[in-house]
Image (cartoon, grey):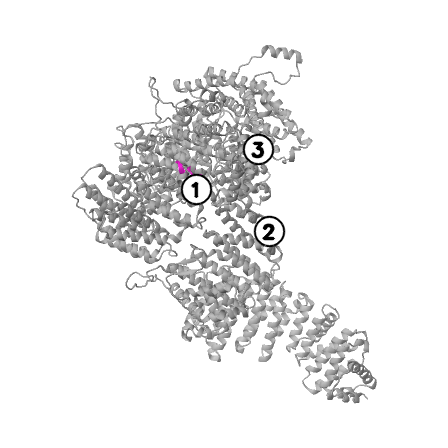
Amino acid sequence: MSLLELVQSSSNKRHSLFTWTTTTFEAISDLPNYENNEVPEYVSNKLINIISQIDTFIQFLTTTEDKEQLDSHYVFIRISHVYSMTLCRLKETSSGKIFDGAEFMINVLGEEDVSLPDPTEESSKKSKKKNSSSKRTHTHSPAKDLAVVILAQLYELFSQELNSLIPLTYFHIFKNLKKAMEKTKYRHATFLVSLLKLYNIILTQNDDPSKDITYISKFTKLSKNIFENIYENDESYPVDMVSLVIETWGLILTQDHFLKENSSNLLDALYAKFHDSEIGIYGFVNDNTRVVTAKILGDILFDYMNVKQIISLQEAFQVYVRLFSSAKMRDVRSGCFESIVHFITLNTSIDPYFLHGTAYLNILEYIVQVFDDKNIQGLRIGTIARFMRYMSYTHDLILPYINDSSKIQMLIQLLNATNSTEVEANKQTINLFALKSKSHWITLVTLELVEKLLFDLGSSFTNEIQLTATIKATLLQLCVSENFSVRIYATRVTKTFLSSCKYMVLDIMENSLNILSKGFSSQGKFEYSKLHGNAFLLANLIELADKDIVPYELIMKVTVFATSFIKNNTTSTAADLYFKGLICWILMCGLMNYKDESYLKMQTSQLFLFWKVLLTHSFTYRNEEELKRNLEVRTHALTCLLTYLNNTQFDKETAKQISYLLTKCSNFNHSVTLKSKDIDNILLTNENKILQVYVRIKDFINVDFNNSLLLLTMKNFSDPNLYIEPNKNILSTITKLGKSKKKEDNKKEKVISLTVDSILRQQGDFAFGLSSKIERNSIKDISSGKPHNRKQSQINKLWVKDEYEWYYRFEEEVTKPISPVLSFDSLTLLYANKTHSHVNTALPKVTTSLIDFSMELFSSVFPYLNSNIQYSVLETLNLSLFSKATTPLRSVAISANVCTTLYQALLLIQEKQLGLEEFVGKLIADSLKKIEFHNDEFLTVLKSECLGLVCAAVSRQLELSSRRDYIDDEVKTLTKNLVDIEEPYPRMLFVLGLTSIYKYNPSDTSFKTVHDIVCTLVNDPHPVIHSWSLYAQYYLFERYLNLDLPLVNDTIVSLENYISNPSYGIFGDSTLRYNYCNEYNSYQLVSYITRLLTEKIGPNFSELSQEGSDSFKNITNSTLLSTDITSVFNGLKIYENIATFKLDSILCEKQFIQTIKNTLQSSLLVGLGSNKFNILFTKPTHVLPFSAGYNIVVKSFELLTQLLKLNKIDQIGSEFEPLAWRYLVLYPQNKIVRSYFLEWLRCTSQKTNWYDKLYIMVNTSTQKIFEGTFEHIRSIYMHYQPSLNVAIQRDHNDENKNEVAAGEDTINWKTKDLILELYVHLIRFTKRDMESTNLFSYQYEKLCKVAFQGAASRVESCNLKGLDLLIDVIDILKTQHKSHGFDKEQLRELEIQLTSALMPIFHEGSSSNAVGRAIGVIADSFCFVGLLNNEPTRISEFMTKLLTIFGGNNDTAYVADTKFVTRKSRREIEISVLSAWAKITEASMNKANDYLLSFAKPYWKVLVPLWIISLREYLMLFYQENDVSFESVGPISDESTESRNTKLGLYKPVWLNFTKVIGTLLSADETVIHTCITKEDLDSFMFLLTARCLDELSKSDSGRPLNFELLSTLHNFLKSKALQKILLDNDIFQEFVAIFEKVTKNTDIKEKEVVVELIDDFINGYISINNNSERFLTDIDKLYELLRLLLIMVADILPFVELDIYEMDASISISQEKVTLINKVFVVLGKNIIKFSPVFKVDLYACLLYVMGRIIKSACSNDLMPSILPLLKSIIQGLMKEGSNLNLIDKFYGATKKDITSNLSIENSIAFHFVLLGNGYTGLKENTIVNFGKQVLKISKKEASEDFAMQGLIRLIQSNSKSTSSSMLLNYIFHDILATVEMQSSQVTSKNILLLTTLVKSSREDKDKDISFTLLMLYISQLTKSQLESQTVTHIIELIDENSTIFKDAISKLTTHQRSVIEMILKDQLDSAEISNKDGNVILKTFS
């Protein structure tokens, strides 16, 4: 059915049109990407048909009476995409269709007659009729709307093909615009925007300006009218229309006529346009137009510089600096920086080397000139600090595109690490020294950039010795600058630097402490800046003072230095003493951050003494200066207290002590009567710090809180008499586009909107006392007291603007009047843990900070107050809320503060499940409803949330029966309000309040009631009601747990209507609705609700009705074509949900994956988007199609990672791979991007291909990685902006620049770090393939090179990953060596390669962790390679040299070039060396490697004592309950108190290695150990080690490699009888058994085998120790416990052997490993039970016979027979030996006889009977024996089993059993042998003779031997020569030789014939063999 037929026949025409569009979109998207545009003819015809159907529909739309039913701009945009996608695919084969389509759309726009022919009329008549009646209205119609949308997109995509149509298009555009401007009734908002969009696109894409000149004047007139109407007549226009007007002006300003008019003063003219004209006034002030204005400014400057080539880069930035400096508003300043980033990106797009080297510093130098501008220098600190944040945001956006080599060059220049003459010669150089004479703000900006560069580079640059030294020297110099702010920032940067160069920390800390010591003792001038800078630096570095790099004694020296002064001068205010006191308190703040749990415990009592003396002291001051100083010292002490609380755990008692101190301190502040500005400020600072401490301890004091303090905090944030100064520089709100008032204007000034948003847009930092906790869409939570840990409560979270745009932080500054500044409270660097950005670390000015913490404290305490006090407090708040004695905006601020505080208090009540009395709740609700600022969305949402929380809190206090009634009453009240009040904003509060009541009271609120009301309101087309009702519906569904399918179905159908119906949402005729929905986008909400429903319903989505399913597809697919990135992402999340539930048939997954890929492709560069339409399914016509940023990239990779987990790797495709690598290079530190690569590797089926892939990547350049991107950019410019081709070619041909860049360009170290991690994962994934194929030999050399890169890096994480890689390489080498071996030359080569890869890690600055790991890896490689021909190697020499660290001076340890100076680091290295030697020793003994043993053994005298000492220290620490404390003797020594955990941490990785080697030596040669430790000490030592091993085993998990090592070590230990005796103690033994019972259940088979051996050791030990019968019986139960453990292991594998389990599980599979384990268990049981006394033995035998019987009856009996038979043999022998209870065997055999014949194979059945007969069993009946004999004879005649039968018979004969059963069987066998001689071959006869000779040899008595010999001779006499093999005859002769007498007797019994036959046979053999035998004569004579 065609589109037209579908629409005409449909009852829901809009839905049918939407569905057809979606279906067609899916069909086109699913088409393959045809190469070379070779579209098959049948596909081409289908595509042409789609175009034809859309054209026909438009023709129908021009005349139909159903226009309203089909009108939908939202759907029209999607139809346009289908039209454009189709033409894109037809471009090569049917290019004429593009022109035809555009021409047709122009005719529709021009209202030409395009209607469908009417078949009922003659065409001639119809033509006349139409011509006569046609009248063009030039107003909106659905057909024209659709035509304009399609035409605009066609021009954007195919501008070159449509050049000739431009004049006609212009004509119709301006005809329609002119009509619209005549009267407001003609202004269809959406149509106006579409017309201007069309004009803008044509102007953008048109490369022939001559076609534009006429209509530019028309546009100029139009724009003038628009701006005049806005200002003078207060008319409203769609905000996007204004944006387009401004953007179009940006295009006009690049055209020749403007350039000619202003050729003499071009930049002045441009500045005027953006500063004085409507472009600047209206452009920057509005959130929507600001981004457009920023974009066109960047575009214009880019055009002037690169296309027109009329300005330089410096001149371009002069425009920015001038505009920024003269700006009075944050709007303009934010826009300037958005434009700067856009401008930089545009330049980068045409020149990949634009940011190469130090080019970015040149840009920075231009920008920082703003700080020298006279307009800037007088601004407040907070405002200038905001400028620094702008710079910081810019760095964060640009630096990812600068490679590491360029960053290093920037560092060199910034820090003057070049020759000074070079600096002077280069006038453009910007560095910290060159900036000394300028504003200190420039120094701070430069320092921030240095910090970011240092953070990005990590320690990768520290191999540059000169650079590193220069950075250190420069930063240390700045740390003692005279300027306070420079000192603070320099300290922060220095800390960042030293976090990468930790080996420098010790020297700097010691130097700073020495400077302080000298300064304190000096009698000269007190140099405060120098001493403060050193103290602040030292305090900050303590956090970095890891015990690996800084000795504990230095920390104690700093502690003693600070505390000794404070102790003696706690309250001193004399000049020098005051400054020294401040410095010491700063040091104490830093010391609180020292990472050692015992340190703070040790200092606590002294600290509280200081605080008590200082804070409770009623200080008597004589003048203002003394008071100021005392207050300042108190503030520093309080900061120290806050830092202490942030670093320790404290209880309620401690909190009470602190509360007492704070109360005293606060009382002193209130007692101060001296007043001055300085005193007031410092009192405020002190009070603020008191509040911060209160916030930290609030959880312990909230019940008993001081009421007077509560009232004070309340006054701080709600006093109406504060913050009421008149407003200045107030901006209009988002909905109004204001203009500066001119002097000549007499018009009334515009009314300021009374909203929180208005306050947030105030200039300056006054903000009418609004809390900085309040942001545009969220509330910050600072309750932790740690700014870095702030959480946010999202308000309006569904409409968080610009969440996915890169410029969102610049936009946030527009609504952030209060600016945090680090220098306001520099000690936040000490009491708040830091993040890199530091934005959250800084606090706002003290007055605002006081408000923030007052609100935080109040909201934390209010829930715990008595209800009467709560009521009283609320009444006091009401006085402030509704005070008439304040300004309106101050009232708004108070309302916001109060609502925020109550909201957080109510959230706490909800979280803690507290309650409110009904009268208190009613007062809160009434107060909230009385707040009149209804049009404030922030306050409205906040109030509605509070209403729901109040209901929840009150209802918790009520009886269950009353709760629902209370909630129902509240719902009815709000419902009545909705009915009675018609104003939209109050109704918004009530509908949100209803939703909130349900949200927080779901069990007591009727969902249906609330939902029905919300649904009714959603249908209201008023934008406020509609949008916020949708918002309410989202939260209703989010909270409702029982969504049913019919409800979801109806909802989705309704949601489709809300986006497609022009009565709702942004697209319609109403300007008011357009602008409101532009801010509160209802289409976004529809996508959010649909996404939520997919999460809620999940798999049931497939059961939607056809209409519901179509609507769902329409909504979801339409989001992908939106220009709103939030909606696009919601569409992707919907797809993710559907894919997660495996509902692949519902959506076309190809288009969603294409969306992700194209989104990422278009987000690669940060810039302001230029495409007017979504380009995800067509093609980008601009380099920067849209403005998506970092957040959307991260979200996209998160989604891709989830798709990989859903096995969608094939759908993602290999073409995405280059793009993924590019993003890794840009954001290598992002966890989600990294996880994508790890998941990608995991999902890849051909993992071995990754070896070459990773090797290429680790050695490639950034330029190479981005080469494809810049080729793509060049192609876009070539096709759509040919004017730039010259500039692109010029930069492309700059070979010199390119070559230099390529030579220095490598991927950054963070990317290499991930590649190393991928290598480690890869080698573990493919380990089996590497071991079994030749892949490893191919990759080995590359792996070593990669590992070398890791080891050679100065980054520790790379070092460790390189070592991990080498460990895996060595493991594979070991496996391959075992399988096919390496010769000595190969081993030598391996040794060289491994050593080369390892040795670079021992560089200056390597951490003890990395060096210790490297030593362990070297030991592993040495154990593998060993000594080559007993010759020393580089590794052996290195290992030997390591032992020197145990001798000589222990102050410093050296390993190659690495130095270790702290006790902890030295000990860590010593332990690593000992561990390495332990590995070597153990390997030499376990592998019996003579070379290794001869190498290691000479050093045992040194090593063994050290191993024992180390283990003893470890055991002492481990079993010690409290921290170890060593008393210091004399001065502070290295043996100062250190935490137990610190010391234990050193031993944790290695203690088992020491234990293993001790166990191995004990097992091999105890004398080695005994030379170092006495026998008694050794026993207790071994017991402790055993206990430690058992303790570790008790924590065991299945498959832990550690388990096997622990068990093997215990196996060695338990060979000691003394230890066995200890462990057999009752209490210890029970623990032992409990641990091993757990181990037997939680470990692998391999480990259980060792457990069996351990139990065997124990049983033997018990029997050996209790060697007489009386002692044996004493603890017999212990033996039974051990035997039980053995049987548990059998039962775990074979559950059916247990007595109470009767069912045989046929599904039990038994592996060879399990068979081996069972065999070991049975062997141990068999060999040990036989040693028991008879009374126990019988019971155990019976038990084992039962187990064997169950096994024989099972499905796995045949697998286990080899294990059963030895045990059965042992049991029979044991019973035979005792001579009693033989009936056990009878019973056993009787119970299993049937199963033996039916269940067992014939071989196993025969073996079973052989065991019985061979061990003397006589219970077999004759018929059984005969049948058995037949079976034996039968299998003996089969080649495959004859050997088995022979072996069984031979063993039976050799057993010499006298039983009748055995004799009967042998008689039967030999009878058959003699009876069938003639039929036997030589092979058979040989085996028979073997049986007979065995019988002869086994006969003990002469009589038996005579019979046996006779039988043998009788058999031989019947043979022929051919039946005998020569070897057999030889054996017979040898037998005759040995038994000549018996032989003669046997021969004599034969007949003459028989003797002659024998003689002939034997004689021939003798002759041929020429045997010389001493008895030969006898033999011959005998036969003669």
N-term mark: 3 or 2: 2
Mark 3 — residue? Answer: 1275
Mark-to-mark CA distance, 3 and 2: 35 Å
Q: Is residue 889 in view from this perspective?
A: yes
* 1816 left or right, relative to 573: right
Q: Amino acid at mark 2?
A: Thr
Vertical position of residue 1100 compared to residue 323: above or below? below
- In the image, residue 1888 lies at what x, y percent? 75, 76
Q: Is residue 11 in view from this perspective?
A: no
Vertical position of residue 1591 compared to residue 989: above or below? below
Q: Which residues are magenta?
A: 390-396
Q: Principal SS element in the magenta part?
A: helix
Q: Amino acid at mark 1?
A: Met
Write down the quadrant of residue 98 in the picture.
top right
Q: Nearer the viewer, residue 1564 or 1146?
A: 1564
Q: Amino acid at mark 3?
A: Ser
Residue at the outermost right position: 1953
- In the image, residue 2 lies at what x, y percent? 64, 26
Mark 2 — residue? Answer: 1248
Mark 1 — residue? Answer: 410
- In the image, residue 271 lies at what x, y percent? 41, 25
- Whether the residues at callouts 3 and 2 have beta carbons within 8 Å, the answer is no
N-term mark: 1 or 2: 1
Neighbor class of circle 2 (other Cα within 10 Å; few <14, some 14-19, many 20+) is some
